[in-house]
Structure formats: C-alpha cells, structure tokens
Amino acid sequence: MTDTIIARTAEPDGAPRLAIMDILRGIAILGILFMNINDMGQSLNASFGDIRHLGWAPADQIAWWIREILANGTARCLLEMLFGVGMVILTDRFATAASGWAVLRRYYVRNIVLFLFGVVHMYILLWPGDILHSYGLAALVAVLFRQLRPRWLLTIGLSMALIQLSMGGYFGYYQGLQKRAQAAAIQAKQAAGQKLTVAETKRLKDRAKALAERAKQEAEFKKEVADEDKGRSGTGLSWMWTQILISWDRFPSFGEIFTIWEAAGTMLIGAALYKMGIIQGLRSRRYYLGILMIGYGIGGTLRAIGAWEQTLFDNAPHSFWATMEVARLLMTMGHIGLVHVMMGSGLGQRLLRPFAAAGRTALSVYVAQTMITLWVIFPPWGLALYGQLSWAPLMLLALAINAALLIWANLYVRYLDIAPVEWLWRSLIAWRPVPWRQRAVSRPAAAEPLPA
C-alpha cells in the first residue's frame, strides 16, 4: 500500500489517526444521510411499513431500489466496524499509560459521554434515529472482548450476526411458509366437502384469529402514520412533541436490545478485521478485488431478492427476514473492497482523498445533518417541507447536503485540527478544553483513524 494510505498523524489531544480509516468513516457518515433523510422528511413509521407512502412514481422506485441494494444498513455497518477498530486503537493507546481496570474505566467514560450525546441528539436536537447512544452502550459490551485473537472476535461477532439468520429463517420464514401451506391444504379439504378433524378446525380458527389480529395491527399502523404526519406538519410545538414521542418509542424500549446486539457484534467483526490488517488496507489489491466481487456478488443478489420481495406488498413470509444481516455484512465488505481497490490507483486516491476530512469531522457532520434537516428544511418554523418530497427528491436532497458538508469539512481541516462536536466530546472526557490545533508544526496531508 502507498504511504498516503498508511499515513498517520495525531489530533490536538494526542489521539492517533490513520488516513484510510478517515476515508472509510467519511464515506460512512455521509452515506448514513441517505438512510436517514426519508425518516427526517417523511413518516419514520411508514419507512418501516408501507414504503409507497413516501411516493412510488417511477423515479421514486428507481431511487428506492438503488438505496435499498447499495446503501441500506451498510453505512451503519461500516461505522460499527470502524468503532471496533477505534476500540482496539484506543485501548492499546490507554494501555501504554495504564492497565487492567484503568483502561476499561477510561474507555467506559468516553462511551458514557457519547451515550449522553446521543440522548441529547434524540430529545433536544429531536432526531429519533440517533445511533450515538446505541454505539455508546454497545461499546461497553464489545470492549470486554478486545484482547481476543482475531479468529475469536470473528467467531463471536459472526455468531451474534447469524442468530438472525437462524431465528428469522426458522420462526419467520420457514414456520410462516408451513402455516400458510397447512391452512391452504385444510381450506382445500373443506372446499371439497370433506370433514375436518378437531386439530384442523382449530388450525383454521387460529389462522382466522391471526389474520384478524394482523388487520387490526395494519389499521393501528395506518393511524400511527397519520398521527405522525399530522404532528410533524402542524405547529412547531406539535412537531417537537411528535419527535420526542417517537424517540421515546425507540429508547428506552425493549427493541433497543437488538440494536445494541447488532452494533456490538459488528464492532467485534471490525476489531478482528483491523487485527488481521484487512480494513486498514494491508492486503494486496487482488485480495480486495476478491472481497469486492464476493461481497457485491452474494450480498447484492440477496439484497435484490429482498428488495423484490418488499415490492410485492403482500403478507407472505419473505426470505430477507433471514438473510438481511448476512447481506448487510457482505455489501459492507464489498464497499471496503471497492475503496481499497480504488486506493491502489492515483485516480482513485484523488477521488477518495476529500472524504478523509469528513472522517476527521464525522461527529460534527452527523450533527450538522440533523440541524440542517430537522431545524431548517423540514420543520414548520423552517422551510416546512415535511411530507412534500418523495423518495427521489429526498435522495437528491441528501446528495446536495452531503456535497455542502464535504466542502465544509475540507475547508475546516485546513485551519483547525478538531471539529466542534469532537472538541466538546474530548474536552468533557479530559475535563479540560483540548487545543483546537496540535502543537506539532508538520503533519501528513491526509490522516486519522478513530471511529467515534
């Protein structure tokens, strides 16, 4: 790999940084807006239910398909992996000055503060889709495994991820198919005038009860979407209250356990990839080309099947319930492979280098995305565009916002070495203001690693 790829530098508080990690983080933090903006500009509930509620014209369908196959969950996955990388780098760095519980204590303080940032992001800045609080909690679990060898980190991380494959595959997909087939056979027998057994009669009653419950849930879902649309397109107070209620439905809630589970498992995978020299680009170009082809080939196929199943808009069991996490990991590995293949050429490096600045300012960029969308573009006191943009315009808006933030990040790092939200975070951890610039006169042009 080139010197640019492995170039290191330090932040004002002494934290080491690695250029390629910043490029990956910059791509991930900008990419996450494509996943969030539909929940910011239209019903968050509808995004997890009837995607047609956000618009389903031909252009919207194209935008949704591209987003679903290439981006859905992969920006979050990459950030989780990079968080695992940062966990290894930081705890190794802490270990040079402390040991044992002292290392854990410093890392715990860091992530408890990050968790509190996430709570503020949800309830003060009004973004229910925050990831910081989840990552802060997940890191408290993942760090306990930090000293394991890569194969054990991979084994634990993949085992946590593949539970969805087995649970979703059996209880969601297989059992769903079985129940539908049994009901169809019993109904055919009944239609033929044959007498049903007691067990078969009970199955039909259970099936009818389940269908009635599903219809009730669908009616409740439509009401939730309508109430959300009404609250978020009403007054400033109704907008704020609706956002807070949605945040409360997410955290604290039982469902948060699954979010933390996913994040912790993916962090361990990221830590393993770092210890193996994969994620930071220490393997051959041919190796990364293989990762790209496998990741996109298998992951992209699973994603395409899942997207097609969703557009059937039926209540049938779907295979993507089981394969969703596998596809997410594979597509993310494909993205990592693509970045490293591009970094093997001069043109690729020139194209990717600007993203390093977004990686160095990732927390500030993430919060800026919220401030621009939820405090300027969509709320009633701003441009009041909530509910006015469908899938395609929302994706184009995300592209425009990201372009502006990428320009801002590159201008910012010319003059200062730490971004505003990062400065606040690290100053709170250190219990003193950290400097805005490092004292060293010289440093490489591109650099840094820690995922935040």
Image (spheres, rainbow, N blue to C red):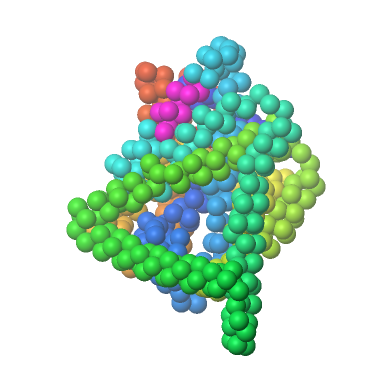
Can residue 114 be found in the magenta stretch? yes
Front-most of residues 411 and 143: 143
Compared across the picture, whether 367 is left or right of 289 comes to left
Q: Is residue 39 above or below residue 18?
A: below
All told, the count of numbered labels is: 0
- Residue at 45% x, 74% y is 56
- The answer to whether any part of residue 346 appears in the image is no
Q: Position of residue 433 (x, y in %)?
A: 36, 21
Compared across the picture, whether 117 is left or right of 297 comes to left
Can residue 236 be found in the magenta stretch? no
Main SS, magenta region, reads: helix
Q: Is residue 59 above or below residue 327?
A: below
- Residue at 43% x, 70% y is 212
Compared across the picture, whether 202 is left or right of 155 comes to left
What residue range appears in magenta?
106-115
Q: Position of residue 112 (x, y in %)?
A: 43, 28
Compared across the picture, whether 265 is left or right of 282 comes to left
- The answer to whether any part of residue 120 appears in the image is yes
Q: Position of residue 268 (x, y in %)?
A: 63, 35
Q: Is residue 351 above or below residue 61?
A: above
- Residue at 74% x, 33% y is 151
Furthest residue to the bottom? 192
Occupied quadrant, residue 191: bottom right
Q: Is residue 381 above or below residue 49?
A: above
